[in-house]
Image: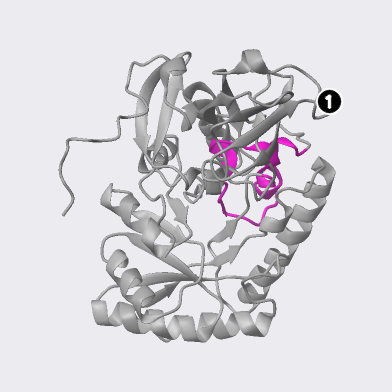
Amino acid sequence: MAEDLGLYVPPAARIGDPLQRVGTPSLVLDLDAFEFNIERMAALAAAHGIALRPHAKAHKSTAIAAAQLAAGAVGVCCQKLSEVYPFVRQGIRDIHLSNEVVGADKMAMAAELARHARLSICADHVAQIDALGAAAAQAGTRITVLPEVDIGQGRCGVTGSDELMALVERIARYGSLRFGGLQAYHGGIQHLATWNERRDAALRSAEKAAQHVRHLEARGIACSVVTGGGTGTVEFDVESGVFTEVQPGSYVFMDGHYGSNEWGGTLKLQHSLFIATTVMSTAKHGMAVCDVGLKGVAVDSGLPRVRPGDDDALRYTAANDEHGILRIADGDEDDGDVRDRLGERLMLIPGHCDPTANLYRQYVCYRGDTVEALWDIDASGLSR
C-alpha cells in the first residue's frame, strides 16, 4: 500500500503570479491575443449571416467553449463521444459530433448524451444509421444525423448522389432520428501554402457540397444545414453561398503550421498559445537544451519555433522525449557560445496546436506579465 507522505506536485502557476515564475513546461495562453481571435471570427461569421460552431477538438476546454458561446457561437463541434461529456456537464447543450461512430458502446454513449443535449452525429453508412436509430429508440430519445459527403479529402463521407439518398432515406425510417443536413469538410486544404491556392481549393470543395444540396432539393428534400470549413479556408467558406455553418477550431490559438500559410483577407489572427520552456543545459558548445520535448509538444506538423523577440538567435532543431535541442540559427553546430543562456526562459510556438493541447491538463492564462486565470483542459485524453 502506498504511504501518504503528504507529497503532492506543486502547481506550476497560481493566479497573480508573474509570468516569469510559471513552472516549465507549461501551456500558456495570451488572453489579449486569444480574445482578439475570438472576436474576429465571431464578427466574420456574423457579417455574413453564417452560424459559427467552433471545433472544440482544438482546445478541449469548457472555459474556452464558454467564451466562444458568449461571443455568439451557436454551439460547438466535438470529434469523439467521450469528448462530449465534459461540455454537456458544464451546460453546453448544442453539440455536433463531426465524425462517424460504430460499436454498441458508442451507440449507448450517443443515446445517453442525446438525453441531455441537442446532439447531432455524422454517418456515411446505413449500418451506422440503423444502430443509432435502434439505440435512440431504446433510450427514448432522438438523435439528429448529418450524412457526411466527401468534398475532396478522400477520408470519410459518401461521394455519389445515390449513396447520399440511401442515407437520407434510411434516416427517415426511424422516428428516433431526424435528418439534420450535411457534413462537408475538407481538412486537406486548410494548410495549402498560398492564399490563392486555398481559395481555389475551397471554392471547388464548396461546389461539390452544393451539388449534393441541389440533388436533395431536386428530390424534394430541404437541406437547411451545410456545416464544415476550417480556420485556413473560413474566409472563403463564409462567402461561398453554400455553407450555413462553419467549424473553425485552431483560430483561437493559431500555430506554426498555420503561421507558415500566406494570409490575405481581413482576419489577421494572432498567435495566442505557447509552451513556456527553460534552457536546462548548455554543456555542449553551440547547443542549448530546453525542457520541452515530445511529451510537451506535438511535432507532426513541424517542430516548434521560438517566439519572435524572445531569442531570435535560437531555433528548435530536434525533440527527444523530455529534451528540446536549440541551436544558433543559420550556424554550424559548433558555432556560437550559448553558456550564458542557462536558465533562459522562452516561449515556443507549437507546430500543431490541437495535439499539443491534448498533452496538458491546464492552460495558464496570462495578460501582460501576470497570470490571470487557470483553465482546465477538461477533455484532455478523451479520445473514445
Q: Please say which color scheme the image uses.
A: one colour
User: x, y (%) of residue 138?
Assistant: 26, 82
What residue do we see at 60% from left, 56% from top? 228
- Splitting the image into 4 quarters, where does residue 102 fall? bottom left
Number of labelled discs?
1
User: x, y (%) of residue 266?
Assistant: 69, 30
**Is 205 covered by the magenta stretch?**
no
Can residue 172 be seen here? The reply is no
State the quadrant of the C terminus.
bottom left
**Is 234 covered by the magenta stretch?**
yes
Q: Which residue is mark 1?
A: 331
Q: Amino acid at mark 1?
A: Gly
Q: Front-most of 208 and 217?
A: 208
Residue 214 located left or right of residue 105: right
Classify mark 1: helix, strand or loop: loop
Q: Front-most of 248 and 235?
A: 248
User: x, y (%) of residue 272?
Assistant: 55, 29
State the quadrant of the N terminus.
bottom left
Residue 114 located left or right of residue 196: left
Residue 320 located left or right of residue 380: right
Residue 224 located left or right of residue 92: right
What residue do we see at 37% from left, 21% from top? 372
Q: Which residues are magenta?
A: 232-261
Dot 1: few (<14), some (14–19), or many (≥20) neighbours within 10 Å? few
What residue do we see at 69% from left, 42% from top? 257
Can residue 286 be seen here? The reply is yes
Q: Front-most of 151 and 330?
A: 330
User: x, y (%) of residue 19?
Assistant: 45, 17
Q: Is residue 282 above or below residue 381?
A: above
